[in-house]
Amino acid sequence: MCGIAGYIGSDNLSQHPLEVVLEGLSRLEYRGYDSSGVAVNTKKEIAIRKKVGRVENLRREIEKNPVPDGVCAIGHTRWATHGKPTDANAHPHCSQTNNVAIVHNGIVENHQELRNELIALGHTFRSETDSEVIAHLLGIALDECADLPRAMAKTVARLEGSYAIVAIAPSQPQMIVAARRNSPLVVGLGEGENFLGSDVAAFVGYTRYAMAIDQDRIVTVFRDRVEVTDFAGNRVEPTVYEVDWNVDAALHDGYDTFMEKEIHEQPQAVAETLRGRLTADGHLKLDELRIGEEELRSIDKIIVVACGSAAYAGHVAKYAIEHWCRIPVEVELAHEFRYRDSIVNAKTLVVAISQSGETMDTLMAVRHAAEQGARVLAIVNVFGSTIAREADAVLYTHAGPEVAVASTKAFSAQITAAYLLGLYLAELRGNKFSDEVAAYLEELGKMPQRIRKVLEQEDRVKALAAQMSDVDSVLFLGRHVGFPIALEGALKLKELAYIHAEGFAAGELKHGPIALIEKDLPVFVIVPTPRRPLLHAKVVSNVSEVQARGARVVVIAEEGDDAIDDSVKNVIRVPQSTPTLMMPLVTVVPLQIFACELAKLKGYDVDKPRNLAKAVTVE
Ligand code: M6R
């Protein structure tokens, strides 16, 4: 939540810093978009412009009210936590004497106490935010020590909570100083110029070399070097890495929206996640493994922790891993896991699933698990993200940057990675022979093509959305691996089209939800393959039950499944002979297209739905 960008370059005064930061903010807007702002350091003063609404509003404001040239700049795109989205609450915030400006991502938990203390000293506040106390404290500390990095260290010593703070001061124009605890921050390394961002999207148009910033660090960024220390001032050596995607990957590519582009990128996301997974002697490998094989053989329980769509990918993982490895798998929402007495010990493998690798609830669950002695394996999309760095093993999803707030290709890639994990453990623990694993991998290799076949039915799904654009409630039913997909279909519709949507296990229907069925209520039913007659027959009878009560049924069924007869008008077909456990990769696609189209028909911004942000970096 909240995007931060910073730039420092050549000292001949130019407009460049402002442009670089504005471009960074546009690329980071998916992190929060209720207001945005920039601060430019002119050496004499800090020029600030900020505006409620999208970054385009800020650009218009700057056109009307130009910013003087500067040597470095910082910017922020906000997702409000404390204080409404207003111009005044937008970042950057200044100290009492305007000797520093800061942007902040995170939450200052003791802000009220600090604010009271500062008010007693005669300070006046210009916003309702928790962040403004940071600017005031930093301003005082800078007056005391005349050194921005040291002032930052003094300031963070007073803060409780989470933060990525980036600051500039007219008295120290040769540097940008940042501090990080529990909120993401990364440095981009250029030639004679350097960058800061909440993620690499802020600067990947300029450089692909990035420096990962660990927990509890202060970073001083000059135009030609970067110094990193811990909070006590000891120098530390950070890790530098090359970003494996370029700026083109974050463009619309001819689609109206990022979400549509990302829906269509799913075959590639799955293929990339599968790529290069075999060792020379034909065994599956993870990306990073800091857990001994013996330890992995001895685990007696897996707990998947994740939030939102990633948790539904975890539900799919449960079905696959339990079936292939015979290990009990629990799936737990990360925020619930941490606050109950979950039974975790050294024989537990906690699998954290997260696209961003920065979701605070999941990160806290990871730390909680590690404290209990569990080993943590992360399935993460963003390279070098906090969860990836703190886990004992990592399986990257290689879906490429996902910009739309609603997860699509990352979800498919997470499911794919979960299958790989299941097969890896099954082979390692001797539950499956390597030829059996190879057969599953061959089937997985066919999934991109199967997804493409479903995408070919896009127009049919869009036509359905057009017929239903006035509905105010939709239900989704699924059984077995279709159940998490029903939940995902409902989540997509809620977050994009803002209508009531519920996903149910089809078997639950008669235990309550059937009372909701009334004439013309849209009900999507995900029908399992007829090759699993027990599962199939039960869901087919659910179709009849809701139809008999007048619902408008849309069925997602396998090609050639003739139990779905003429009585069902709306049928979306998925390719025949997809292995049962791999069905989610094809059945989810029509649900994504449906939600996206319905939201577009309602005139909503599908890439940036209201109230949401891409990475939820506060609890
Ligand atoms: O970055 P993460 O995968 O950890 O994010 C988890 C959820 O916040 C995310 O999946 C969210 O539910 C999406 N908006 C769903 O489309």
Image (tube, rainbow, N blue to C red):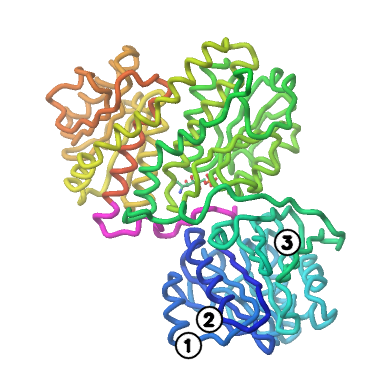
Residue 616, above or below 488: below
> Mark 1 or mark 3, which has the lower sequence index?
1
Task: Give the alpha-carbon distance from disc 1 to disc 3, as whole Å.
Answer: 37 Å
Evaluate if marks 1 and 3 touch, with contact meaning CB atoms under 8 Å apart. no
- Secondary structure of the residue carrying tag 1 is loop
* Residue on which the image places disc 2: 49
Give percent across and percent down for residue 466. Answer: 19, 48
Query: Badge 2, how many Cα within 10 Å: few under 14, some, many 20+?
Result: many
Question: Would you say residue 608 sits in the magenta stretch?
Answer: yes
Report the amino acid beneath label 2: Arg
> Mark 2 or mark 3, which has the lower sequence index?
2
Which of 56/513 is in front? 56
Task: Give the alpha-carbon distance from disc 2 to disc 3, as whole Å.
Answer: 28 Å
- Secondary structure of the residue carrying tag 2 is strand
Magenta residues: mostly which secondary structure? loop
Q: Which mark is residue 429?
A: none
Q: Image point 20% across, 42% down: which residue? A: 464
- Give residue 389's quadrant in the image: top right
Q: Image point 37% across, 53% down: which residue? A: 253
Report the amino acid beneath label 1: Asn
Give percent across and percent down for residue 613. Answer: 48, 56
Residue furthest bottom as drawn: 44
Residue 180, above or below 589: below
Would residue 299 be found to the left or right of residue 506 on screen? right
Evaluate if marks 2 and 1 touch, with contact meaning CB atoms under 8 Å apart. yes
Query: Badge 1, how many Cα within 10 Å: few under 14, some, many 20+?
Result: few
Report the amino acid beneath label 3: Glu
Q: Which mark is residue 160?
A: 3
Magenta highlight range: 599-619
Which of 476/608 is in front? 608
* Residue on which the image places disc 1: 65
- Secondary structure of the residue carrying tag 3 is loop
